[in-house]
Image: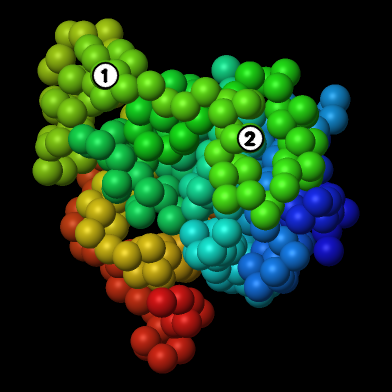
Amino acid sequence: MSEFLLIEEHGGVGMITLSRPKAMNALSLGMVRGIAGALRQWKDDTRIHAIAVRGSDKNGPFGNFCAGGDIRFFHEVALAGTPELEDFFTEEYALNYLTHHLGKPLIAFLDGIVFGGGMGLCQGATHRLVTPRTKMAMPETLIGLFADVGGGYFLGRCPGTAGEWMALTGQHIDADQAIALDLADWHIKAAQQAIAWDTLATLDWTKAHALDAWLQLHTVAAQAGPVFPDMQVWGLINRHFAHATVGDIFRSLEADPDPWAQETAAGLRKRSPLMLHVALEHVRRARTMSLADDLRMERDMVRHCFHSAHLGRSGAATDTVEGIRALVIDKDQNPQWNPAQVEDVTPDMVEPFFQSPWPVFAHPLKDLL
């Protein structure tokens, strides 16, 4: 059990509150283990009819959902060479898989920040509720990582080339955009969340449509409309991010005088060039994979991120550790990427990220079906 979790049972509902507000509920290894333990227990518990999860901020419940994994922890254990880094990703990805296979409703209150590992925690939910404060993103390329936690699976299934756009740019999206991209299901007013949360524990689960009635009372279903709230931007996303390579995407964006294209290209120039190439290949491979196969691939990839043997790098020499250093350790916002330019990345640098360091029988996630 983690000090940063509140795990309760009320009225046939398992309830999890992420309670690490100073870190925007960033997931520690203890939090991953606590959540996974609760879900495994409730999965087969006939007394539990539904599960709900929310975050918290300094003012109390809600406010923020989860900012992702604890990247300060990643930096510390990567430099120390301790096994907790390997444990974290194996157990987090197993948790991501579990959320898709509970066999009962999982209701996620996605208020405020929902980044990275927070996305992995909620995308398997059957009911994903967003508020006017919701900001979703997969910003991993900014720290020399890729859109993991099942990101290849759920981004690869977004309409058009939105998955490529989100995986490469780390762009934040709001509630309307999240629903348009099938990353959320219902709107809920921020002020309505506490009432809705408390009311879950009062439902009569012997009634077949108890949860549907609860949804009608507290939420607003997505309305049919444009595929994306800003159709001009939608056209630009699909024009530029459909290109075959990262180099082609850059050339397309930088040749387009539209301010959106220019701003997007400039933002991409701040990301890890190597991981932009890896991230694009990842989403496109995962688009036709099962969730289990994608998570196994991601587990291979993240090992290579921290131990890039084919590049002769580990620890501080990797783009991932360097990206975390620049963002949250030294906070100089000046990562020294290697290679420094997108144009200098070669296929020989990228392809080994997709080669498993384990034989099939020994893979850490071999038991995922």
Left or right of residue 136, residue 64 in this image: right
Picture residue at 48% right of the left edge, 22% below the top: 174
Query: Earlier along the polypeptide chain: callout 2 or callout 1?
Result: 2
Residue bearing mark 1: 226
**Which residue type does callout 2 highlight?**
Trp
Count neighbours of disc 1 (C-alpha within 10 A) and say few if under 14, some if 14 to 19, many if 20 or more. few
Query: Residue 63 appears in which quarter of the rendering?
Result: top right
- Residue at image coords 29%, 48%: 156
- In the image, is residue 321 above or below residue 158? below
Mark identifier at residue 272: none
Which of 213/262 is in front? 213
Q: Nearer the viewer, residue 53 or 91?
A: 53
Which residue in the protein does label 2 denote? Answer: 214
Picture residue at 54% right of the left edge, 64% below the top: 103
Q: Position of residue 347 (x, y in %)?
A: 19, 57
Give neighbour class at mark 2: few <14, some 14-19, many 20+ (Cα, 10 Å): some
Query: How many badges with numbers are in the image?
Result: 2
Residue 16 visible in this rendered orientation of the protein: no
Q: Label 1 sits on what residue type?
A: Pro
Furthest residue in direction bottom, as rendered: 361
Quarter of the image with the N terminus in it:
bottom right
In the image, is residue 125 above or below residue 226?
below
Left or right placement of residue 312 versus residue 113 in this view: left
- Residue 34 visible, this orientation: yes
Above or below for 99 versus 361: above
Return the x and y of residue 166 as percentages of the image width and height. Answer: 36, 35
Element at label 1: loop
Please name which of the two marks, 2 or 1, marks the residue nearer to the observer: 2
Quadrant where the C terminus sits is: bottom left
Circle 2: element type? helix
Residue drawn at (70%, 22%), measured in percent from left and top? 192
Reply above or below: 29 against 68.
below
